[in-house]
Image: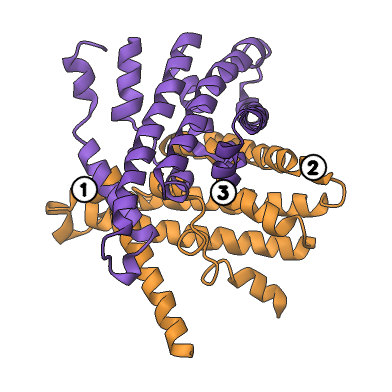
Amino acid sequence: MSYIGIVITYVFIQNFILVQFMGLCPFIGVSKNSESAIGMGVAVTFVTAITSVVCWAVSYFFLIPFGLEYLQTIAYILVIAALVQLVEMIIRKMSPGLYQALGIYLPLITTNCAVLGIAVINADNGYNMLESFVAGLAAGLGFTMAIILMSNIREKLEMTPVRRVFRGVPIAFISAGLMALAFMMFDKSLITNLHLA
Amino acid sequence: MSHINELTKGIFKENPTFIIMLGMCPTLGVSTQVSNAIGMGLSVIFVLTCSNIFISLLRKIIPDSVRIPCYIVIIASFVTIVEMVLHAYVPSVYEALGVYLPLIVVNCIILGRAEAFAGKNGVLDSALDGIGMGVGFTLSLSLIALIREVLGAGTITLFPMGSFSGVITLPGLSASPVRVLTLAAGALLLMGYLKAFFQWKTERCKGGKA
């Protein structure tokens, strides 16, 4: 599949939040205002892009030559934990404001399904290094797009009268459901029609 | 008495899915069929109980500053065991769970219980806590899967046993199912309504007691 095909697949057709449900915890938790949503999106995109490359390298240079594919899950999660620690240190140094805004959710990127998810999906699809990188970047961008859209919807919802039992998380889920319904218009035929397969 | 409390709190009072809202990704991702939900639930019970026991045993040895990576490695080892066992003995479930199986490692419930409970409590309590939370997760996952499959496809898929194919077809519903519930959008909508129902229920319980 071409690189544009990969980007369209992971941003729209297989959107990590709205189609695959990966990274729902930060999606619901951090989407209350658009500033922290953008910060979270950027941090996740950064981590997914780098993780994809590093995990590809780990499996290409260590796991496959030594026949250790069964250790894939453990190896990947260690790589991710180390990378997230690194990103945390960089953000704390470069932008203390963003660091404050992301708060507890920054270390939680380690346990964000989207990060381990993209690494496993890359391995399952047998992508090469550049394809892995593009897929990771696109998955992160899809996540960022969904979380920014969601934060704008939730800012509007704050001003809207909502029945008490639906306030907060339930209405957020229902809004996400309606967004997912809209995203159903993107499917595999898009790739075929654009001749990107 | 308190031991029983550790076991039952995960099922209702601190239900991981509906009350603490942890581990949403697998909950929505694999709840298209009842059999997948049960397979996922059993895997989580196993991993959660074993990791809780091990972390509780090692809690005095693991240094505080590196405890999260240690927990993750312990959890990842048990997930690898589950992956290999399912791949060898129940390949159909292994195929169906797909990417969500390695994702048990990053299921917030497991790390959350390790951090909040097993790292501070004794072995017996931690094991019971793991079983209770796992059962609570399995029950809520199966509930979501049951609603989605019955309304969305008009069937209930269980495991094939002997002459029984494993699929129960419901006559009225399978002809004209609410197809959207089996899709991604339906899962999110259903989760919103279920959460609203639980919020309403909690509020009413509190109102009744006051």
Give the quadrant of the N terminus of chain B: bottom right
Chain assignment, label 2: B
Chain shown orange: that is B
Chain bearing tag 3 is B
Which of labels 3 and 1 is toward the front? 3
Give the chain letter for purple. A
Against A78, residue A18 (above or below) is: below
Q: Residues within 10 Å of mark 2 (few under 14, many from 20)?
A: few
Q: Which mark is residue B108?
A: 3
Is A48 placed above or below B139 here? above
User: x%, y% of residue B86?
Assistant: 54, 39
Secondary structure type for disc 3: helix
Residue position marked by numbered label 2 in the rendering? B65
The residue at which mark 1 appears reads as B180
The amino acid beneath tag 2 is Ser
Q: Is residue A126 visible?
A: no
Q: Residue at x 54, y 72 (%)?
A: B13
| Picture coordinates of residue B3, whole percent (x, y) | 71, 73
The alpha-carbon separation of the residues under discs 2 and 1 comes to 46 Å
Same chain shared by disc 3 and disc 1: yes
Is label 2 in a helix, a strand or a loop?
Answer: helix
Observer-side mark, 2 or 3, equals: 2
Q: Position of residue B46 (x, y in %)?
A: 62, 51
Q: Give the alpha-carbon distance from disc 3 to disc 1, as whole Å.
A: 27 Å
Give the answer, above or below, for where A157 lies relative to A106: below
